Image (spheres, helix red, strand yellow):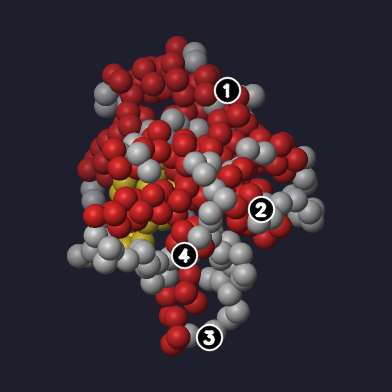
């Protein structure tokens, strides 16, 4: 009978294995994100969940047990002063495991183990970029390129508020079901200011997508004054531009793959260079303020 079989052995003795897992949990509580192999990440997440639940109880017995388990005082301080307040309303699921593929050399599966809702949450960044991308994709399909480049994604907050009210599995909405599901999960246990932060980050990424070709046009015009042989930049093989509906695999294969019809509204470098009506749009101004260089600001 499989009694008492709880964790992996990792080809180590019990004392070595326990100390390794304690060290990983301590590092996770100290940095809020660690990178290790997938089996170690899964067992570390299982232990970290129990320690965080112990910290939420905040009684003397739980404090003593957590202090005996963790190896650094900073990890114990973060547990009872930061994590217990952050996860006070969350019933569980304090960790997230993101797969990173296999490691070069021994081909071991790698993963990133992080605490959810941490200041550098990977899922938060990925979802914000997906929201910005899909808002721009939808606007380009309905409006002119010059109008989209000038306007940006200022309505991101209204779109996210509407997406929050859509039930799981219900049709409708602007975002893809997977993106909408991630948005609802991220905003479920965060404060009221989370919607403002997510919409601002999504709008910032949308402005960056729209401003990049326009900023490259400014760089191209400035360089062309010095060298008339300077050619417009071309896209990299497999690069997916704003407005593109084909898969990255089809784009990378090119003429060797199945030729699907390209959509008419794609913000390519050539189209951006022909946008005569666009004169320093708001997205370009915000982009230049973040990445200001002398030849960009003078263009």
x then y, percent, for residue 230: 28, 63
- Labels 1 and 2 touching (C-beta < 8 A): no
- Kind of element beneath mark 2: helix
Residue denoted by label 1:
88
- Labels 4 and 3 touching (C-beta < 8 A): no
- Labels 2 and 3 touching (C-beta < 8 A): no
Tell me how far mark 4 sits from mark 1, CA to CA.
52 Å
Residue denoted by label 2:
139
Q: Earlier in the sequence, mark 2 or mark 3?
A: 2
Q: Quadrant of the C terminus?
A: top left
x then y, percent, for residue 252: 42, 75
- Kind of element beneath mark 4: helix
Q: Nearer the viewer, mark 4 or mark 3?
A: 4
Q: Nearer the viewer, residue 93 or 299?
A: 299
Q: Earlier in the sequence, mark 4 or mark 1?
A: 1
Residue found at x 56% / y 71%: 246
Tell me how far mark 1 sits from mark 3, CA to CA.
52 Å
Residue 274 showing in the rendered view:
yes
Residue denoted by label 3:
258
Residue denoted by label 4:
270
Q: Earlier in the sequence, mark 1 or mark 3?
A: 1
Q: Earlier in the sequence, mark 1 or mark 2?
A: 1
- Kind of element beneath mark 1: loop
Mark 2 neighbour class, 10 Å CA radius: few under 14, some 14 to 19, many 20 or more: some
Examine the rendered structure and indicate whether residue 173 appears above or below residue 93.
below
Q: Nearer the viewer, mark 1 or mark 3?
A: 3
Q: Nearer the viewer, residue 274 or 286?
A: 274
x then y, percent, for residue 123: 50, 44
Tell me how far mark 1 sits from mark 2, CA to CA.
39 Å
């Amino acid at each position: 009978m499989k009694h008492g079989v709880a964790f992996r052995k990792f080809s180590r003795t019990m004392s070595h294995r326990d100390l390794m897992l304690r060290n990983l949990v301590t590092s996770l509580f100290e940095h809020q994100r660690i990178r290790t192999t997938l089996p170690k990440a899964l067992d570390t997440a299982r232990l970290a969940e129990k320690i965080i639940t112990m910290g939420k109880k905040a009684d003397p017995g739980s404090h003593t047990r957590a202090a005996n388990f963790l190896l650094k005082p900073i990890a114990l301080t973060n547990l009872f002063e930061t994590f217990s307040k952050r996860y006070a309303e969350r019933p569980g699921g304090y960790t997230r495991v993101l797969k990173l593929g296999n490691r070069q050399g021994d081909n071991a599966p790698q993963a990133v183990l992080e605490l959810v809702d941490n200041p550098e949450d990977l899922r938060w960044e990925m979802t914000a970029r997906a929201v910005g991308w899909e808002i721009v994709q939808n606007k380009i399909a309905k409006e002119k390129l010059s109008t989209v480049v000038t306007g940006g994604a200022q309505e991101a907050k209204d779109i996210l508020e509407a997406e929050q009210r859509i039930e799981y599995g219900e049709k409708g909405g602007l975002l893809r079901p997977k993106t909408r599901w991630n948005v609802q999960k991220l905003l479920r246990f965060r404060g009221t200011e989370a919607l403002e932060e997510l919409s601002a980050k999504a709008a910032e990424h949308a402005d960056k997508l729209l401003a990049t070709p326009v900023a490259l046009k400014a760089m191209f015009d400035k360089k062309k004054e010095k060298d008339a042989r300077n050619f417009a930049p071309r896209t990299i093989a497999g690069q997916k531009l704003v407005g593109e509906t084909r898969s990255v695999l089809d784009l990378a294969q090119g003429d060797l793959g199945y030729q699907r019809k390209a959509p008419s509204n794609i913000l390519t470098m050539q189209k951006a260079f022909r946008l005569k009506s666009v004169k320093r749009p708001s997205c370009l101004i915000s982009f230049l303020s973040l990445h200001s260089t002398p030849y960009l600001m003078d263009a």
